[in-house]
Image (tube, rainbow, N blue to C red):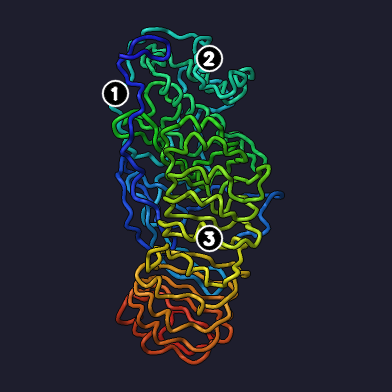
Amino acid sequence: TISNVFGTPTTRSSQIPTMSLEPSTLPSLRPSVLPTISTSPTVQDSTSPSTEPTKSFQPTISQKEPSVIPSSTPSFHPTLQISSLPSLIPSTSPAPSPNPTSTPTQSSIPSLQPSSSPTTVPSLQPSSPPTLSLSPTIKASLSPTLSTLPTTSPSAEPSYQPTPFHLQTLLVNSGIALKGGQEFTDPTSYQSKALLWLENHDGNGENLDVSTLTVSQLSQRYALGCLYYATYNVTNPYHTPSSPEGGWTHTANWLDVKHHECDRTYPWMGVICHRTSEIVVRLDLRQFYLTGTVPPELGLFTSLQSLDLYDNPIYNANYEWLLPLKSTLEYLYYGSTYFISEEEGSDGAIPMEIGQLTKLKQYEAHQTLYSGALEGTTFQNLQQMEYLSLGGNDFRQSTIPTEILTLPKLKYLYVEDANISSSQGMGYLNDMVVQGQTTATLVDHWVHLNPDMGGTLDEVDWSLFSSTLQGLNVGGCNLRSTIPTEIGLLEVVTHLWLDSNNLVGTIPSQIGQLTNLKVLNITFGEALEGSVPQEVCNLRTAHELQVFEMDCSVECNCCTNTCP
């Protein structure tokens, strides 16, 4: 028996268990490849998109914007599917232009993704103080199928009825109030709104009694309230909600005063809890239309394993809230947001705090507002990293650091349209073989739309990637070379984009050895000549080559594109 937050005995444990749960199978590969990584699922979501999500907002930024503006969105944005993390299978190949015409589709990525700004909004508005009937009256159109798994339900018999004074004092004395109570002096602050919401948990009637919660459980519930009020219909330096009702697009069961956030019958959309406890381990808030600024109270989720904020017009410039999560966080996604890299004493684009998340396996910061050098010291301790997506930012002609290239578990690397260069041309790929190994771990790599890369295809030892590389996009990298015959060594490659470079010579017949190839694009080759060998055309009839686009300077009777 332990004491609850008000000193009253309760049987609910305050000890946070060591969690065996991991956020399901990993998202992988944008263009084409099915990863083999798997972890224990906890909950299942039945809704997963087959195509790249429609943006719920379009940034209109007049300042602090990267100097290199991505011309297209990335082909893959990872999302945690609640039971199994994604893989990607492209539906078609890029068109004859520097951008792929079509981006690979995701086969099993996230759970809940709105396609547009909400047409209806919850009755609850963050600007209005909550009342006892605070649960939203309008449910999101996508009903979650999250199966959160609590083991106990909150006690219905309060042993003590808290007063506002007692609750506020407890938040301060227990360290839950991060500013020592100063945040409550302003009744319009999101912290004050979260406090008032908690005060409505009075245990009367069917309401959940907050006095039965332990300190850790109260901290978690307060953090959820802060997250909601800080990001619901709030203006930030880069975005103003489109209407007074411009709140979240998914609010099912949020701020429900009757049920615990881990209640499996009334799950809070996007909140996933540990299988055998009432501890939040995953927040899947992708495309929820979160606005405002990331609240530092996110650091109160000290058992959080996965955080997905992808594609929300939310702002962030301070990353200290990540530090309390460094011993648990494994998956972090905040691409297509207004995250900026303003840190004193650092010219690096990626915040230094990221380098302290040593358990991180997947990190997605595609198309944020990052601008600065890509510094290797940020990545040197991220030895568990498997998936890294940094495209669509401005790295000011940085090279890809050795500390990234030599990460021992890295399989998926995306730095497309990121203003990077290379002192070795394409030869930097040879550095991706970890010492003591004879082959690289790289499965999929997109580096297209970086014209300062330069170099040749001959600089790569393709034998290092023969049994692993399944997708490669080097379109628009200003490569000046022939297509080497050694490219036929890529035994498992399924997607290959060589378009929009200064390629010369003929098409090697060895490409016909790539019997797993589904997409091949060699358009805009400038000085290619001759005709497509029959061995390559055989891939269209005898194997799986579905999309084959060739530069019009080469004669081809088996290609899928049409030349004038």
Give the quarter of the image for residue 401.
bottom right
Q: Position of residue 171 (x, y in %)?
A: 51, 18
Does residue 409 appear left or right of residue 459 in this picture?
A: left
Badge 2: few (under 14), some or many (20 or more) residues near its Cα, within 10 Å? many
Which dot marks residue 423? none
Which secondary structure lies at badge 2?
Answer: helix
* Residue in the image at 47% along x and 22% along y: 134
Q: Position of residue 522 (x, y in %)?
A: 49, 79
**The C terminus sits in image quarter:** bottom right
* Residue nearest the viewer, comparing 156 with 357: 357
Residue underneath mark 2 = 168
- The amino acid type found where label 2 is placed reads Gln
* Residue in the image at 59% along x and 54% along y: 375
* Residue nearest the viewer, comparing 170 with 562: 170
Q: Position of residue 475 (x, y in %)?
A: 54, 72
In contact (CB < 8 Å): disc 1 and disc 2:
no
Which secondary structure lies at badge 3?
Answer: helix
Cα distance between the residues tagged 1 and 2: 26 Å
Badge 1: few (under 14), some or many (20 or more) residues near its Cα, within 10 Å? few
Which dot marks residue 152? 1
* Residue in the image at 42% along x and 25% along y: 256
- Which residue, as the protein is rendered here, is positioned at the far right? 63
Which secondary structure lies at badge 1?
Answer: loop
Residue underneath mark 3 = 402
Circle 1 or circle 3, nearest the eye: 3
- The amino acid type found where label 3 is placed reads Thr
